Amino acid sequence: MQIGKVVGRAISTVKHKSFQGVKLLLVQALDAKGQPDGEPVLTVDNLGAGPGMRVLISSDGKGARELVGAKNSPVRWLTIGVLDE
């Protein structure tokens, strides 16, 4: 699990069928000092997070695949919490 900041949404007209109807966010992982840590990742979100919000993300691929309801989905990251300011 990592803390990250939502930097945008991903919108696509062509995507893997397991992503149909799923909200996709672009999240920048943050280090302990709140600085960017690596490249932004694409997460699936069912919590209603939006740009500028701090979130808790996980790279639990199995959990992400359960969220989208497809065992063969290429999804890896998911939003598991929205952090209070």
Image (cartoon, helix red, strand yellow):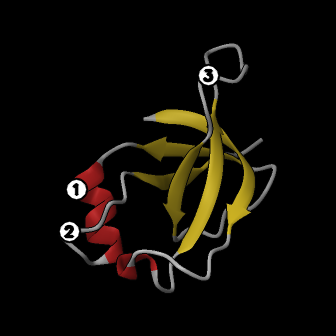
> Marks 1 and 2: CB-CB under 8 Å?
no
For badge 1, the amino acid type reads Lys
Q: Residues within 10 Å of mark 1 (few under 14, many from 20)?
A: some
- CA separation, marks 3 and 1? 23 Å
Q: Name the residue under label 2.
A: 72
- Quarter location, residue 65: bottom left
Q: Which residue lies furthest to the right in this view?
A: 52
Helix, strand or loop under label 3: loop
Indicate whether 80 appears above or below 69: above
Q: Residue furthest bottom?
A: 21
For badge 2, the amino acid type reads Asn
Q: Nearer the viewer, residue 14 or 43?
A: 14
Q: Point out residue 83 in the picture as x, y percentages from the top left corner.
A: 65, 45
Helix, strand or loop under label 1: helix
Is 27 placed left or right of 75 in the picture?
right
- CA separation, marks 3 and 2? 28 Å
Q: Mark 3 points at which residue?
A: 37
For badge 3, the amino acid type reads Asp
Residue for point 36% across, 51% down: 76
